[in-house]
Amino acid sequence: MPSSDPVKLTLYVAGQTPKSLAAIENLEAICRTHLAGRYSIEVIDLRKSPQLAREHNIVAIPTLVRELPIPIRKIIGDLSDSQKVLVHLAVGTE
Amino acid sequence: MTAAYPGVGIEELRRRLEEAEDTLRAIREGEVDALVIGGDMAEEVFTLEGGVEAYRAFMEAMEFGAAALDGHGRLVYANHALGELLGRTAAELNAVGLFAALEPAAASAVRRIAAKAAHGGRRTVEISIKAGDEDRHLLVSAAPLRLGPSEGVAVTFADLTARVRAAAAEESERMARAVITSANEAVVVCDGDGVVTHVNAAALALVTVSPVGQPFRDAFALEFAANGLMEQEDLIAVAIAGAPVQGIEASVPNAVRHQDLLVSAAPLVVAGQQTRGCVVTLVDLTPRKAAERQQLLLMHELDHRVRNTLTLVTAICARTASSADTIEAFQTAFLGRIQALAATHKLLSEKSWADLTIQEIVQAELAPYVGAASMRVRLAGLGVPVTARTATALGLIFHELTTNAVKHGALSVNDGVIDVRAIEDDESFVIEWREREGPVVSEPTRSGFGRTVIARSLAFAPDGGADMRFEPEGVVCTMRIPAQEVRPSTGV
């Protein structure tokens, strides 16, 4: 993936559970550091809109979905391991 | 394609399998805390926090402010009571976070105890926050909390404001009472109707009945010395209306003892600008007034004494000159008499012109010739204080008697003795000067000023005076001092 491609991310959370809060904070920190200027994040609270889980077949929360660039990738958990997140996002390697 | 999943390729199935395995791993390792359950039904979210709804419902039922933080201090949930305490809705609080809703110092204190509590144990701290225009005092307690697979911290906020204010008010009241009680001057506190509510010991000493509960005007019944412009009711009314009144002289006719007072009154402002009564201070002027009267008396006395002394010096000079045969004789006699006056004056001034005893006067006059411990002079019953004018008269008489004894009488020989003693008498205080063991005495051929001084000095009152007799054994002089000139004996 060319390093200039935009990265579109969707984070599914469940209100303010500890893991959801941690995932939001960790994702914002990773993006600021490694994807500055070329990412967008949409946070979807499945407590408010549980039906939105169907689009990406979400089972566990929190789950991060990389929608762009394709192919779609999912990362489950609170994203506290930034190296693992970066590997899964494959930023700059595809 | 596969048989079980028609239309789905092997790669897609492999991806789905990896995703399913990752989901299971994440659940097993506690990386998720909520699941979406749906299938053919509508999706629902279930958290793994362990009865989250139950603990949130419990938090809402609490009257205390409460918050659940995760292990990193992030706000998981805050109840409505905490929102109200911090002046925000619970939703606003949950949006901005707990620490952003607190002032920096308070946020730091809560963050500190939350971090400690996360490692075990309960911690508490008191903080102050601004809620609108008023300060609120909160007792914050933090304790570990299990949030499903995660560790967190439960933080509760108890509003101590009312208790702190009550304690402050109590302390303030105690301090105010201590100030009133400790004041040297009389302090009286009245309510808005002029009724006495508090008094200190100095104020109680002014009256015979406790004034608390009585109108000030009845309890103290002051009489103002001024020109009638200010009455007691006016004093209290003016102060209660908010204007201080300072330094009005008054007295309390019905007091335990008569006192001259300096009265001031000030409005009692308890909270804000509202006047709740007045504080009256009564400063005892009695000692100052007495000192002023004494000073005035002394000034008159000094004036009188200076004029008398000048007249006396003139007379002494004239009479000494008429009886002296030579300039040297005049000089010796005149200086001796003036020095006697000076010695008496010195004694008087050292004693503030009062309370000089007869013995002190006799000893002052004899001192140049006979030591205080000498057996030649015997004094008895003379430790009696006399008035200043009697002291002056006795000073002159004893000077003349001493001078005569030195020149012609008991003190002119080595064995002569002088007895000076008080003699009982109903109407006046009598002193006898009796010389013996000296030369044989005979009546002198002429009467000098010395005898005139002796005869007249105590004759300022009908029952005062002195007689001098020249008996062969020695001179005898009897002095009568008017009773009113003598004060109670000091026991000398």
Image (cartoon, helix red, strand yellow):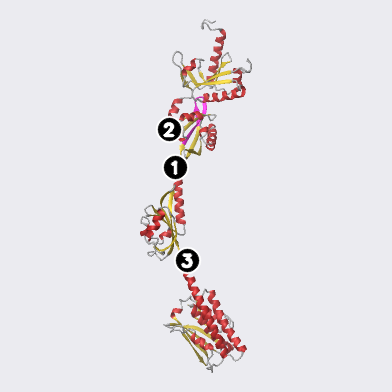
Q: Secondary structure at mark 3?
A: helix
Asked if B474 appears above or below B127 in the picture, the reply is: below
Q: Is residue B218 left or right of residue B9?
A: left
Q: Residue at x 44, y 80 (%)?
A: B483
Q: Determine contact: label 3, label 2, CB under 8 Å.
A: no
B471 or B180: nearer the viewer: B180
Q: Secondary structure at mark 2?
A: loop
Residue at the disc numbered 2: B62
- Residue B28 rendering spot, x and y as whole percentages: 53, 20
Predominant SS of the magenta segment: strand
Q: What segment is highlighted magenta in the picture?
A: B144-157
Residue at the disc numbered 1: B163
- Residue B143 rendering spot, x and y as whole percentages: 50, 33
Q: Which mark is residue B288?
A: 3
CA separation in Å, label 1 and label 2:
19 Å
CA separation in Å, label 1 and label 3:
48 Å
Question: Tag 2: residue type?
Answer: Met
- Residue A72 rendering spot, x and y as whole percentages: 56, 14
CA separation in Å, label 3 and label 2:
68 Å
Q: Secondary structure at mark 1?
A: helix
Chain of the residue that carries numbered disc 2 in the rendered image: B
